[in-house]
Image (cartoon, rainbow, N blue to C red):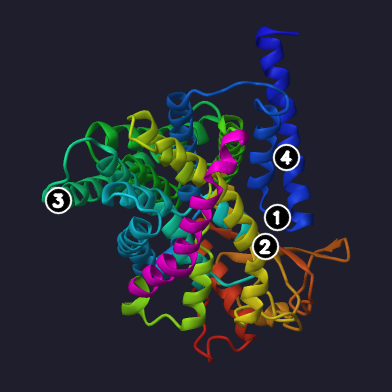
Amino acid sequence: MGGVTGFLGIAAAVLLLSVIAVRVSIRLGLPSLLLYLGIGVLLGEAVVGIEFEDADLTRSLGTAALVLILTEGGITSRWSEVRPALGLGIALSTVSVGVSIAVTGFALHFLLDMDWRTALLWGAVLSSTDAAAVFSVLRGVGVGKRLIGPLELESGINDAPVYIAVVLLAAPEPITWTAPLLMAYELIAGAVIGIALGWLGGIGLRRAALPATGLYPLATVAVCLLAYTVGDLAHASGFLAVYIAALVLGNARLPHRADTLSFAEGLGWIAQIGLFVLLGLYASPGRLLDALVPALVAGAVLVLLARPLSVLCAALPFRVPWREQVFISWSGLRGAVPIVFALIPLIQGVPGAQQLVDAVFVLVVVLTLVQGTTLPWLAKWLKLVKSGEAQEVQVDSSALDELGAELLQVRIQRGSKLHGVYLSELRLPPGSSVSLVVRDKDGFTPQPTTRLQEHDQLLVVCTEAMRTATEQRIRAVDRAGRFARWKGDVGLP
């Protein structure tokens, strides 16, 4: 078996194995990215024997995968959840990055006897958190959106300034006073391009009459990829442009929005799996042992000094409680992004760049094991989530485009204040109604006298215009009960 047949067979086997690895990782309490990296290492030169040492191709494919991951992250993010964390998220993506680079570089200059530029380059590569790593771990921790929101924004935005810093530090030219101005231009221009293309793309997709439903998700993703291309051609931040364009599109009134969200999520999974397997395939286990000591030193500096100080500086104007600062500091997981960025100085022939790549690979594995497995324990110890505490109601939606309506699927969690509320007391906005209740696997049409219970699943039909108001009312009653309005809870995140 060879050629295309063999390639497709191997790709299918790796993909299926990676999908199964998600289930295994949840049972073991490990981030799935480690299993993907492990699959790549097994396929590599040390075990199966596939030799892959093309750093340039790895960087190019890695960049393409990161663009798709950022697209999925932006499209699936809800603006109503992101907006309250906007200030802190931007601060973590900019101020925190600068402080982390400076502190890490200063420490490594003295501890590992590096020259200043090399030390700062290490600091820049290590300062970027990874969206795939962060959310594969946070998914089961159970902390609220107050913490997840800024971490999501940080992991989506900070790739842009970190990439610029790595390129500047890896270049042979001396860094001049114009470097901050260049960075500011790239970030501002990237944001403007992302907003413009996201807005124009939303208008175009609403007015288009495409012949098939499946073309709308493709067109949406294509607009996001175009934002990256335009940003890169304009010497702006393509990473920031694609994330913001995806965020704007994901929160626009798109035709077949539910199909687009599902498609983007699947595309993101493929990109994550492919990226981590590729990086595992590129890694050389024989070199990793030599990079162990510098990796552990850099990791200790990053986790115990640079990350806490950078979070403190970023969170200072927002009066974030110390418990939340500790959790945010420990949640700064590194994943594929630092490894991809470490390939930039290697391709440009920077002395010692190979050691940087190997050290980052070791560090990603070690920090993911240490931080990822201890985050749930830390959240409980900091009292950010309590066992037995009420869980927030789960609301999923599907678009009914031809009717101009949406279908919300609501699951009433244990401890919810919706328990015991009569349907007549729910008082949904005009244009919204509960059409079905599923209780103990039996479905029935509810009446005004139907009393809701824990673990009930509701199907709520509402107009597109009332979708947000309907969800807010359900969330308000979930938190504050039938008298939510009197208590001042309007269902905002």
Q: Residue 181 shows which numbered tag?
A: 3
Separation of residues labelled 1 and 2 (CA atoms): 6 Å
Q: Residues within 10 Å of mark 2 (few under 14, many from 20)?
A: some
Between residue 10 and residue 249, name the one nearer to us. 10
Whether pointer 3 and pointer 1 mark residues with C-beta atoms closer than 8 Å, the reply is no
Between residue 247 and residue 307, name the one nearer to us. 307
Looking at the rendered structure, the secondary structure element under dot 3 is: helix
Residue 373 image offset from top left, x and y in percent: 67, 62
Q: Residue 30 shows which numbered tag?
A: 1
- The residue under label 2 is 373
Circle 4: residue type: Val
Q: Residues within 10 Å of mark 3 (few under 14, many from 20)?
A: few
Looking at the rendered structure, the secondary structure element under dot 4 is: helix
Circle 1: residue type: Leu
Magenta residues, start to end: 285-313
Q: Earlier in the sequence, mark 1 or mark 2?
A: 1
* Relative vertical location of residue 486 with respect to residue 156 in this rendering, above or below: below
Quadrant of residue 262 within the rendered picture: top right
Q: Earlier in the sequence, mark 4 or mark 3?
A: 4
Query: Which residue is drawn at the image coordinates 77% and 73% (left, top)?
Result: 447
Q: Is residue 151 a member of the stretch shown in magenta? A: no
Residue 301 image offset from top left, x and y in percent: 45, 63
